[in-house]
Every structure is written in structure tokens, then in C-alpha cells.
Image (spheres, rainbow, N blue to C red):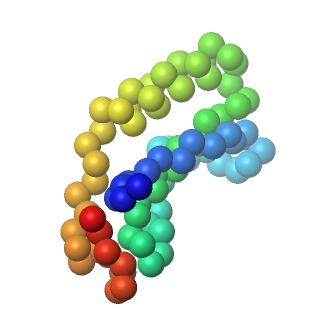
Amino acid sequence: MGLPHGHLVYAATRQDGPSRSGPTEHVVRRVGITVTAHALDLDRPPAELLTAVSHLADRITSAPEPDVAEADVPPGATRE
């Protein structure tokens, strides 16, 4: 697909550990793709969960793509 950035949304519960204050970013080795991981707390009441999903969708669709310099691309990988 040639995309430099993607999002991963996954289900979490309080049993999974302490709640993160926000999304975390990970760079995929050898290709330099950045993935932003977002956890949804399924222990929330349904109305709160729907609100969280709506806010997450707004944040993902309105966020600018990260500025990734060629220096951030591992050796042997290319950014198109």
C-alpha cells in the first residue's frame, strides 16, 4: 500500500494492566512504517465506550500524518 503510517485499535480491560494516558507509536523494523496503537477499555459502560470510539475516530481522521524523515528509515528500506 505504500503508507508510511497506520493505526491499530485493540480491545483492552483494566486487567490488562495500567491504563495508558494515550496512544503509543511503534516503528516497524526494516520498513520504517509507524503504527500508532490505541487501546479501547472494554470495562467501560456501553455509552462511554461509544463516546470513546467516536473521539478516537475523530482524532484519527483529523490528525496530520507524522513527519517522517528519510533518516528514520532503516537501511535497506525505502519510503515511497
Tell me which residue sits at (28%, 48%) in the image. Answer: 65
Q: Position of residue 22 (x, y in %)?
A: 47, 44
Q: Nearer the viewer, residue 46 or 17?
A: 46
Q: Position of residue 74 (x, y in %)?
A: 36, 80
58 sits left or right of 79 in the view: right
Q: Quadrant of residue 73?
A: bottom left
Q: Is residue 27 visible?
A: yes
Tell me which residue sits at (23%, 73%) in the image. Answer: 70
Looking at the image, the residue that sits furthest to the top is: 47
Q: Nearer the viewer, residue 74 or 17?
A: 74
Task: Tell how many labels.
Answer: 0
Tell me which residue sits at (61%, 36%) in the image. Answer: 40
- Split into 4 quadrants, where in the image is the N terminus? bottom left
Looking at the image, the residue that sits furthest to the right is: 15
Q: Quadrant of residue 15?
A: top right
Q: Position of residue 75 (x, y in %)?
A: 35, 86
Tell me which residue sits at (28%, 54%) in the image. Answer: 66
Q: Is residue 25 visible?
A: no
Q: Position of residue 29 (x, y in %)?
A: 47, 75
Looking at the image, the residue that sits furthest to the bottom is: 75
- Split into 4 quadrants, where in the image is the C terminus? bottom left
18 sits left or right of 64 in the view: right
Q: Where 8 sits versus 76, above or below?
A: above
76 sits left or right of 35 in the view: left
